[in-house]
Image (cartoon, helix red, strand yellow):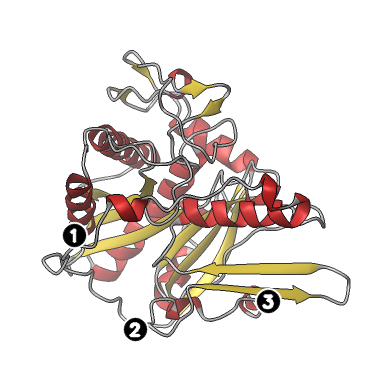
Amino acid sequence: MEVVNHIIPWDIGEATLITTPIVGVQVTTFDCGGVAICVHVSHTIADGFAGATFIHAWSVASRVGVDEVVRPSFDLASIFHARDTSMFKSPPPQDTRSKIVTKGFIFEKQAISRLGAKVAGLLEYDHQHFNEKFLRVNGTMSGCDPGFYFGGKPPLAVNTSNMVEAPLVRTSQPSRVELVACTIWKPLTDVSQAKHGHSRTSVLCLSLNLRGRTGITTSENSLGNFYIQVPTKFMKTGEMELHDLVNILRNKLRSVTASSRKLSNSDDVCITVMNHLDQDMHDGNIDVHHFTSLCKFPFYETDFGWGKPCWVTTPSASFEVVSMVDTSFGTGVEVKVSLNEVDMKEFECHPDFVEFTP
């Protein structure tokens, strides 16, 4: 982690300062001949989809020329006009008195398969028409957020016109992101219970890409921020197993995805997004855990003309967050967990976590 922190343009914790540039790039060369490229894009102007699209287009322009680049669109600005958001409270700042440490962990393909086997046959029926096998369009997953489903590289251009409605069936194997996120969430709830002496309501916040998921027509390559924070909440009342958390998370994601399709204008979208952001964020008796996934974005296909990368990762964070990204072969998940120092000591030795990470 120390090496990664030395090759980023600036401290990631300062990205929201007025004086902070919106984009920073640092190229680092090593004595062995290797090269590291770090791209830092402020969330003020771009979400994960936009950032991945920018990096992909940049690499294509460098390798074969700008004429081959799919032109980005900034039509979101014409749809979502500036508005007064003062009625919505900002989430309270995290406690800065505790030292935040970041540690990396790897969930290999074999570990994820074991996690899948652990919950197999214990998942609820899917009532929201999102069975993976019925959502395949031309061999890829269309209209689905990268990282939530197995199979196929997600298209940068989202098209939902050919979706086929699924019947009521038991869902297939949950995605890598769902399995890994819940495997991390469970120890976090136990750490909280041990710290406070009692169970507390826990919220897992995961971002969901809204491109192609609402009733609003946008360009296939719309850049900017067009996502929703999905807060999945539960209160531990007894022994909670992994499949229980997977069921809760999957049901919430599908519920939000289904309701998003009914949003037909920018006002509805903004109100829904802000209401989701506002839920439970201001209650000091609720634990809120922020997760972000870059899985299934084509970062390992990025080629500036020197070949494809051997490692794609994220840096340390100065706030509590869990980030997930593909391993180099696209079958495992690399996780960066940023927690306060005291909680990290308990978390990283939790038996349910250690069992699946080397």
Q: Residue at x 59, y 36 (%)?
A: 153
Task: Tell me the amino acid under the disc marked 3.
Answer: Val
In the image, 141 versus 61, the foreground residue is 61
SS class of the residue under badge 3? Answer: helix
Q: Report x, y in % for residue 258.
A: 27, 32
Q: Report x, y in % for residue 349.
A: 50, 63
- How packed mark 1 is, by other alpha carbons closer than 10 Å (few <14, some 14-19, many 20 or more), is some
The tag earlier along the polypeptide, 1 or 2, is: 2
Labelled pair 1, 2 in contact (Cβ < 8 Å) = no
Q: Dividing the picture into quarters, in which one does residue 61 lie?
A: bottom right
* Residue 96: mark: 2
Gap in Å between the C-alphas at discs 1 and 3? 36 Å
* Residue 278: mark: 1
Gap in Å between the C-alphas at discs 2 and 3? 24 Å
* Relative vertical location of residue 180 with respect to residue 259 in this rendering, above or below: below
SS class of the residue under badge 2? Answer: loop
Nearer to us of marks 1 and 3 is 1
SS class of the residue under badge 1? Answer: helix
Q: On the image, numbered disc 3 is attached to which residue?
A: 3
Task: Tell me the amino acid under the disc marked 2.
Answer: Thr
Nearer to us of marks 1 and 2 is 1
